[in-house]
Image: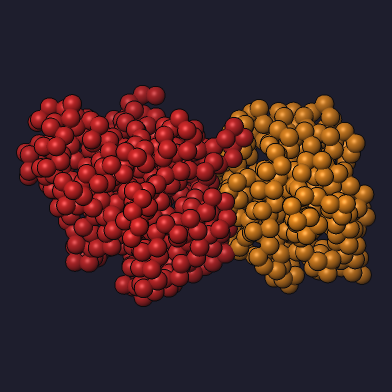
Chain colours: A orange, B red
Amino acid sequence: MSGAIGGAMGGRARIEARFAKLRDEGRAALVTYVMSGDPDLATSARILAGLPAAGADIIELGLAFTDPMADGPSIQVAGLRALKAGITLKKTLAMAAEFRARDTETPIILMGYYNPIHSFGVEAFLAAASASGIDGLIMVDLPPEEDDELCRPALDAGLSFIRLATPTTDDARLGAVLANTSGFVYYVSYTGITGAGSADADTVGGAVARIRRHTDLPIAVGFGIRTPEQARAIAAVADGAVVGTAFTDAVRDSLDDGGNATMDTVDAVLNLTRELAAGVAAGRKRAAS
Amino acid sequence: MSKPNSYRTGPDGAGRFGIHGGRFAAETLMPLILELEKEYRAAQNDPGFREELDYYLKHYAGRPSPLYFAQRLTEHFGGAKIYFKRDELNHTGSHKINNCLGQILLARRMGKTRIIAETGAGQHGVASATVSALFNLPCTVYMGEVDVERQQPNVFRMKLLGAEVVPVNSGSRTLKDALNEAMRDWVTNVDDTFYIIGTVAGPHPYPELVRDFQSVIGEEAKEQIMAAEGRLPDTLVACIGGGSNAMGLFHPFLDDAGVELHGVEAAGDGIETGRHAASITGGRPGVLHGNRTYLLQDDDGQITEAHSISAGLDYPGIGPEHAWLHDMGRVRYVAATDAEALEAFQLCSKLEGIIPALEPAHALAHVARIAPDLPKDHVIVMNLCGRGDKDIFTVAEMLGVKI
C-alpha cells in the first residue's frame, strides 16, 4: 500500500528514483545511519530534518533494541540512550512521518532487529510504516530462511527489503540472499560487529564486482566507514557508502556530563554529514576520470 | 491445536517447533549455521561419533549418573516417593558436561580451532573450559559482570582450566548479555570459532542438538526407574532457565502419556512483583538470540531484565521446544520463588546430605509443594542437575551469614 504521506512515489519507487538521480549526477550515495530518539526525541527529529541538506542521500533510521547482537558498543549505547529517552517503534514511525511531510524525496530505511516489529504485529506495522513514509527495511536477524516472517509481506506492501550480503555469503548462497532483495544490496565489508573494523576498498571492490555479476541492483557498502577519506575510497567502488558508528560517536561526544544533548549535538552530526558527503562526491568523480 | 502423533519428531526442516524456534540469525552466521546442521546430520549417522561421545561420557564425565531414592525427603513430605537423578555427580558438577562433550566433538569434526561460550551460573562455562582443556583448544567464556560477582568460585575454576573469562558490562550484565557478547564474538571470528551454546536455545540446529546431547539424562532415568520400580514414573520435575536439563530429562518420556512433566521456572521475588525470570508464566512469544520463543518483554518488544537468585535461571527466554510443549499442553510450567528455592536448598542439605545448586533447588521447591498431597505410591523423578558448592556464598549472604 502507499501511504497518504508517502504518495505514489513511496516505498521501493522512492529508493529507485534516488539511485536513478544519483546515477545521472555520476556519484555514489551517502547513506547515513542515525539512531531514532538519540539522544532525545526532539534532538533526534532536528538531526533527521537536517540530514538531506547536509548531504545525506538516503537515511537509515535505527530502531532501538535492548539486545542488538550485531552492533558494537557505540550503537548499543545509542540505542539505550534512545530507549531511556522514551523512544518506541510508534514514536519512531511518527518521527519518520514528520520528516516525510517536508521531504518527499529522501528515502528512509528502517534498520534494526525483528522483535519490536514482531511485538507490534507485522500487518499493523507494515500499514503504519507505509503511512509514515518508510521506504524500506533492513532487519539484521531476518535471513532469507525467514522470508515468510516480514520480507514477503513487506514486498507485498510496496516496501523494499534490503538484504545484508557479507564476506561469508558465498556464490552458492548469494542467489538466495538476492532473491527477495529490492532497492539496493547492503554489503557488509567485514565479518564482525558495527564499529569494530575498517573497510578495505580493494577487498570491497572485489566483493562488489562479484555481487554485480548476480544483480543489477545498486550496491551500498557499510561497516568500517567513518572518515571522508574512507567514504571517498568506498564510493569509488560501490554505489553507496553507509556510515553509522561515526554518527553515534558524534552524538555521544557532543553530550554534556549528564548525557544530555547540547547546543553542539545537531551540528556535530550535520557537520560530519557534510564532510562525508564531500568525500563520497570526490570518490565517484575520481572513479569516472 | 491438534495433538500430534508424537511429541518427539521436532523440529521441522526449518528448525520450528510449532511457531517457535527458527533461524533468526545475522547473515554472516548463516553459512556456518547451515554447515553445523550438515555436520551434525553426518555425525548422527556416524557410529564412530556416538562411540567416541559415549566413551567420554562414561570414562570422563562419569555417566551413568545414579538414580537415588531420597528416603528422608520422601518421609519428610509424607506423600509421593521422590527420586533424584543425580546429574550433580557428573564431572564439573552439573549436567552441562553432557552437551559440551557432544559439541566439542562436533567442533573437532568441523576443524574449528577456538571455542567460545556464554555462562550464567558458570556451570556451562566450567564445562566448556573443561572440554576445551581436554582437547587442547583455546576457550573464551562470556559472563555478565553481575554473575562474575556472585559466582566467583566458578570464575576461578574456569581460569584454572585455562579459559579466558570476559566480564560483560552491557545491558543487565547477566546471562542474556553474555549471550549477546558471545554472538558478537562469533560473528567476528566466524572462520575458526565454534560457539558452544549451553542451553536448548539459539538458532536451529542448536536447540535440537543440545536436547539430543542432554537426552542421555532421560534415557538413563527411564532404565533406572524401570529397574527400581518396575514401571515408569508418574511425574518428572526439572528446573528451567533455558531448559536444557529439563529437556534432557523430559524428551525420552514425551510420548509416555501417563508421565506428567513439570518444568519449574524462577519466580524471583514473585511473579506478581515483575521481578522474576519466568518467561512462560510471565512472558509472550518474541524473537531473540536466534529463535522465537516466550520472552520477558515490554509492550514495545524490548527485552526486560530477568531476576533470580539463581544465576543459571536468570534469563528472559526459554528454549523453543519448551515453548511449543507449553502451547501443546504436554508440559506443565510452574514457578518457584527465590525464598522457596532457598528453603529447599537448606532442606535438601540437612535431610539428604546433598547440597543442591540453587537451580534444582527451584525444582525441589515445587516437589515440596506437590509431594505431600500425592499418594505414597506416586513416583516423582526430579533432576538434581547441579551441585551447590558454587552457591554457598550467595546463600550465606541471603541468610545473613558472613563466611
Residue at the image point whose x is 64% and y is 59% from the top? A72
Residue B271 sits above or below residue A37 on the image = above
Question: Residue B246's quadrant in the figure?
Answer: top left
Residue B261: x %, y % from top left:
26, 34
Residue B30 visible in rendering: no
Question: Residue B339's quadrant in the figure?
Answer: top left
Residue in front for this viewpoint, A9 or B201: B201
Residue at the image point whose x is 43% and y is 67% from the top? B115
Residue A150: x %, y % from top left:
61, 37
Residue at the image point whose x is 31% and y is 42% from the top? B341
Residue B367: x %, y % from top left:
23, 36
- Count up the numbered dots: 0
Q: Is residue A57 left or right of residue B391?
A: right
Residue in front for this viewpoint, B121 or B331: B121
Q: Is residue B351 left or right of residue A209?
A: left
Residue in front for this viewpoint, A157 or B54: B54
- Quadrant (top left, top right, bottom left, bottom right) of the C terminus of chain B: bottom left
